[in-house]
Structures are given as C-alpha cells and as structure tokens.
C-alpha cells in the first residue's frame, strides 16, 4: 500500500519550502502513521530552513518541528525524535512518526492550542514555573510579551497570582496584553523600556529579546531579582553591568529546549497540556493559514506580525492511498 501526502519540503537552504506531493514509507518498528491537523511555526523552523540547525541532514525533507494530529482517531501532539530537524517533519497531511514522539491531548484542549504545546508550552512552563518560580508575591515583567511564549508566560504568572506587565514595541499589539489581564508597557528600545518601566521595579523579568533589553532588565530589577532568558530576537550578545548584578544579588538563568533530553521534552509537553486543560496557561493563536501559504506564514513570523501563534492547516494535505 502506497500513502501519498502533500508536504512543505525544504529543497534548498534559505529558500521557501516547496509544497508538493510526496510518498511516505511504511511505518517501521516503533513508528505510526499520523493524520495531521495543524502545524505550528517556531523560530526553530526558520533556523532549520536557513541551515543553521540540522544543516547536514539530507535534502529535500519535510519541514516542521511540532504539530497536532490524529493517531487511530485520537488527538496527539507530534514533536521530538529529530522530526523537522534531521528527519522529515510534520508540515504535511500525514507523517510517519516514532511512537515516543506522540503525547495524547486531553479532551478539553483545542487542537489549535495543542499544536503549540510542545515548544511554546514547554518553554513557558519551564521558564515561568521551574526556573522563574513565579508566585503571588512577584511583580513580573515579560519582554517580547506578544510572542507565543510571552503570552503563555503572562497567563502562567497571572494564574500564580503575580502582578504582571508585558512589553511590546507596537501600540497595535498592546490590546493582546490587556486581553490576557496584564498591563502593557510600550517600549520600542531598551532606552524606552528603562523610562516606561522605571516605576515597576520587577522581582522577575522574562526576556525573549536579549541585546540591550537584557541590560535594561538588569537595571530595572529589584534587589534579589531574577532574570530568565529564553530568546535573543533583538540581539544575541549583551554587555552586562556586572557591579549592578552582584550588588543587587541578582540571579540570571536561562532555558532552551534544544538542550533537553527526550524524556524532559515529553514531560514538558505533558505539563503544558495539563496547564492548558486546567486553564492556568493560555496559548493564543494569531492566525491559521493553509499549508499552501507556508511562505506567507513564514514571512509573518519573521516580521513579527500579529500577536500569538501562527499555525498551518494541514487537514487538506492528504491525497489518495493506493
């Protein structure tokens, strides 16, 4: 039996994936065929497309590191096992995936939210709960607050009872922050952040931006404050005022999913799905585009357009089985 599907294929590093029909191999030992529903776009996918991650893996191959689909009629998150990095990924109507890469989705969690649980959800859970240890006594400032992880961190901090502010460079995105129940801080530069957030004196700063924003975060934090870094979209290097760091007794920590073991990644996905199910975490979706519009979706991601996650609708990406 031959299974064919429509997939977004990386043909050349740096180029927009090509949507075309491919033939899938039969599932081997420990593998299953999954009917995909949605795929989530992440910065990691752009690194893979550029060749900065998984650049030595053979081309062409299907892109996409996470998504949600149906296995034997039951909804599952599909992530891990090298999918979308060194092996064919999940941006396709059907995928052959290791059983270990599947995590069941609770019935109360929407497929759209589940599609982003493995990367955004795990990062938010690990950053806010495990590393940041947010509680009701905290004043939390989230940098890059309208990104997928930023919004999820805001929801977790609010659920913990903390007072929360979210930074955005755009007035158009401030509503996404207030809709979650946090106070917006509009700052398009580290200098503006220092001015606009001067009176907050946060106990915890979650930093998805890096560069000069990390320096500003150090200046803003109260004594014994915590800085949690999980991104560098505004700059990969920062020169910190070390005297300020040690005189304030600051704690600077980081979280990155690429360094996690498969068991930790799976455990993080399970925790994220649990938080989505009990309502303590929210992952807003900005837009859903058909697989054929993967180029437009990637351009929106790179341009930081909109607030929330961008998904690909994969449900029409299946052709006949012969």
Image (cartoon, rainbow, N blue to C red):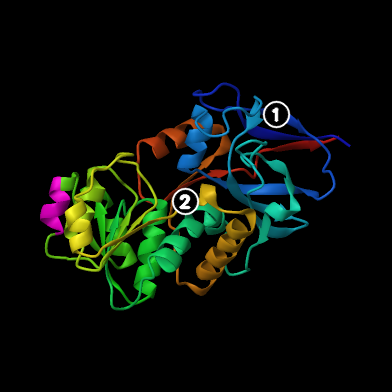
Circle 1: is it few (<14), some (14-19), or many (20+) Cα within 10 Å? some
Real-space Cα distance between discs 2 and 1?
34 Å
The main secondary structure of the magenta stretch is: helix
Quadrant housing residue 261 = bottom right
| Disc sitting over residue 116 in the figure | none
Give percent across and percent down for residue 8.
Answer: 61, 32
Foreground label between 2 and 1: 2
Which residue is at the front of the view, 195 or 316?
195
Which contiguous range is marked in magenta? 191-197
Left or right: 157 with respect to 39? Answer: left
Tell me what residue is drawn at x 23 percent, y 48 percent: 240
The answer to whether 272 is drawn above or below residue 135 in the figure is above
The answer to whether 131 is drawn above or below residue 193 in the figure is below
| Disc sitting over residue 21 in the figure | 1
Left or right: 47 with respect to 168? Answer: right
Circle 2: is it few (<14), some (14-19), or many (20+) Cα within 10 Å? some
Give percent across and percent down for residue 304.
Answer: 35, 41
Label 2: element kind: loop
Q: Quadrant of the C terminus?
A: top right
Give percent across and percent down for residue 20.
Answer: 65, 27
| Label 2 close to label 1 by CB (< 8 Å) | no
Label 1: element kind: strand
Q: Which residue is mark 2?
A: 256
Q: Would you say residue 50 sits in the magenta stretch?
A: no
Q: Quadrant of the N terminus?
A: top right
């Amino acid at each position: 039996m031959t299974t064919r599907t429509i997939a977004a294929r990386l043909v050349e590093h740096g180029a927009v994936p090509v949507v075309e029909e491919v033939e899938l191999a039969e599932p081997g030992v420990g593998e299953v065929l999954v009917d995909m529903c949605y795929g989530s776009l992440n910065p990691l996918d752009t690194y893979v497309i550029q060749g900065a991650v998984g650049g030595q893996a053979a081309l062409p191959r299907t892109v996409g590191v996470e998504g949600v689909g149906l296995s034997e009629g039951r909804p599952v998150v599909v992530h891990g096992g090298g999918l979308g990095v060194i092996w064919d990924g999940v941006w396709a109507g059907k995928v052959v995936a290791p059983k270990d890469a599947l995590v069941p989705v609770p019935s109360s969690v929407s497929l759209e939210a589940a599609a982003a649980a493995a990367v955004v959800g795990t990062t938010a859970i690990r950053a806010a709960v495990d590393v940041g240890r947010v509680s009701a006594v905290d004043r939390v400032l989230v940098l890059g607050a309208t990104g997928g992880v930023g919004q999820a961190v805001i929801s977790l901090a609010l659920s913990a009872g903390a007072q929360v502010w979210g930074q955005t460079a755009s007035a158009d995105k401030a509503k996404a922050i207030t809709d979650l129940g946090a106070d917006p801080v509009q700052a398009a530069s580290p200098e503006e952040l220092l001015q606009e957030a001067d009176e907050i004196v946060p106990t915890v700063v979650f930093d998805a931006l890096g560069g000069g924003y990390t320096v500003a975060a150090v200046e803003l934090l109260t004594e014994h404050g915590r800085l949690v870094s999980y991104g560098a979209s505004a700059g990969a290097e920062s020169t910190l005022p070390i005297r300020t760091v040690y005189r304030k007794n600051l704690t600077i920590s980081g979280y990155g999913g690429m360094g996690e073991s498969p068991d930790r990644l799976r455990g993080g996905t399970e925790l994220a799905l649990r938080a989505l199910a009990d309502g303590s975490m929210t992952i807003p979706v900005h837009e859903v585009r058909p697989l054929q519009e993967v180029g437009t979706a990637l351009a929106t991601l790179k341009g930081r357009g909109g607030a929330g996650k961008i998904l690909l609708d994969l449900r029409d990406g299946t052709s006949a089985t012969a």
